[in-house]
Amino acid sequence: MKKLLTTMRRLYRNAPISQKLFLAFSLMIAVPAVVVSFLFIRNQESQLFKQAMAEGSNHVARLNERLRSRLELLENASATALTQKGFVDFIHSNMRADGLRLVKFKQNQYEQMHNIIQSHEMISSLSFYVDNPEVYEIWPEIYHYSKFWPQDYWMTLRDEGGAAFRLSAFKDGADTLSYYRLVRLQGKHQKLPTIMEVRAKHNVLFNDLLEDSGRDFFTVIMDGADASRNVYLSGHELPQKAGAKLDDILSRVHAQMDVLEQKSPVTVQSGDQSYYALYRYIAPLNAYVVDIASRHELTKGPRDGYLLVIAITSSVLLLMLLLVSRMTRRIFRRLEKVLGSMRKVRRGQLDAKIDTGLGANETGDEIDYVAVSYNSMLDEIQQLMTQVVDKQLIAKNAQLHSLHSQINSHFLYNALESIRMRAEVERQPAIAGALVSLGSLLRYSMQWRSDTVSLSEELANIRSYIRFINFMEGGSIELAADLPPEVQRYRIPKMCMQPIVENAVHHAAPSGGSIQITISVRVENDSLLLIEIRDDGAGVAPRMLDSLQSVLRGDSDTPIISSSSSGLGLDNVHKRLQLHYGTDCGLWISSVQGEHTCVTLRLPWENENLGGW
């Protein structure tokens, strides 16, 4: 969470001001408006749901009453039929005994019973099932009991008070409701009682009750014991959309219905849809009248409101974005000049001032004030930089002249002291030859017409120095420097090689001993000229070598200073090279104790840069 907050702060900080303003306007205007709109729509959705539940509850209550009244009509019709005592008595008698009597029955009692059936439009048929071996089955209203199924159903009727309704008749009852009633119990000639069956077609009995009036609720008459026995209008929108899932929906609703909690809606989930069901129990029919609605359909209006709010909000945010973008573009157009000038200054153009266009007495607005202050700051920076550069040049020149003086004074002191001591001890005329070499050294070191010389001039001075040292100390020091003529013409800093050779003479060879000093030149990466001065002397101790290399890398602040003049010379050369050519140039020392020491001078390869002091 903390990492997320840090990332969001960084994104906000780096975002343009126009985006920040847009975000601020959105948080202050658009977001509250969306929240209020959604809360209002949610309240509307809740109110609509309550209203739909109330309407559905009233509807199932009315259906319950109307259906009960129609069941009473069927009961009344059956009672009227049973008042025809002559008809009932005849079907229990020997109907085959007298043909004339059968004809009179047809003309009188049967026609009366038929008229009763015809007068009730909801009744599709009325049949009597009689356990009478002499019954004559020539009309659809009269059957032998053997045609009734199930045979033992009369016991259920007896237990339920002599009559019962079934939503689906036993025989051909897929679309027929039946009312069964005991007529007569067993007698002398009957083993089984007589049962009357009144049948009513579903499409006649329920059609106007289940008709689709454009409501969101889908009405179902559902058997109390079996959810698969039900009656509904297949043309309603809900079963058409549910398709194969309808049976699952009805089964889930049936499992949650409770006779004692009829006013509480049932909620079921099927697939990704939620459904609400309101119901009433019809005791005579042992069935439920159920109103089912999809939550999707009930909240369709408010849901469309959500889409409308989203569309309006998106349009407002787009307009707001365009407005903020236009405003910020006009407001910060002049500020962009300030930013452009800053970018130029960052690239080194310190004269990139901002044109404010203000008159002498005009002050302008806040952005103009920033521009004027920025121009003044650039003037002050240029003045300060000029002062700093002047101070640095003065300090560098003073440091260089100080370094030159140190080199000259120490060298002269050592040389003259050596000659004096030798002259006092030996009193030899050979000193004259030494003085010739010394004179060359003195002239080279004391004449600073330029800070750079050719490589050949520096080598000539080193050779004079070797001859003088061999004379002074009686040693046998050899110098090998066979360099190509084109390299010897290159300009290098004066006195940058002689202190290194001097260091090799004094430290690499024992007193009076001999060493060989080799000078070679190579180019590295077409950018650096490397001059290597190698001796085959005693080398440098590892601890001292690590200390020297650490200072040369810049890892240590300890200067390369020792009690000998050679230490001071190395320090001077390294500082001079880095002052004039940068940190990529300077000295580097490598050594193996007892084998050799190699000092490498790193100089710019481009010849025209070697004199850029």
Image: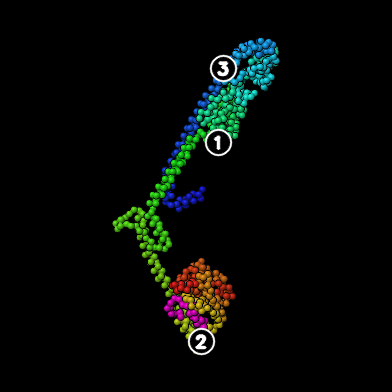
Give above or below for 405 relative to 303.
Answer: below
Give above or below for 567 relative to 113.
Answer: below
Q: In the image, is residue 261 part of the stretch drawn in magenta? A: no
- Residue 31 lies in quadrant: top left
> Which residues, given as a range, are shown in magenta?
444-469
Report the residue marked by disc 2. Answer: 425
Could you tell which of marks 1 and 2 lies nearer the N-terminus? Answer: 1
Check residue 273 in the rendering and tell me which mark sits there, or answer none: 1
Task: Assign a secondary structure to mark 3.
Answer: helix
Check residue 135 in the rendering and tell me which mark sits there, or answer none: none
Residue 500 lies left or right of residue 350; in this view the side is right
Could you tell which of marks 1 and 3 lies nearer the N-terminus? Answer: 3
Residue occupying image coordinates x 44% and y 72%: 612
Report the residue marked by disc 3. Answer: 119
Task: Assign a secondary structure to mark 1.
Answer: strand
Q: Amino acid at mark 2?
A: Val
Q: Position of residue 469 (x, y in %)?
A: 52, 82
Residue 52 lies left or right of residue 137; in this view the side is left
Tag in front: 1 or 3: 3
Label 2: how many residues lie within 10 Å, few (<14), some (14-19) or many (20+)?
A: few
- Residue 392 lies in quadrant: bottom left
Task: Assign a secondary structure to mark 2.
Answer: helix
Q: In the image, is residue 455 part of the stretch drawn in magenta? A: yes
Q: CA distance from mark 1 to mark 3?
A: 46 Å
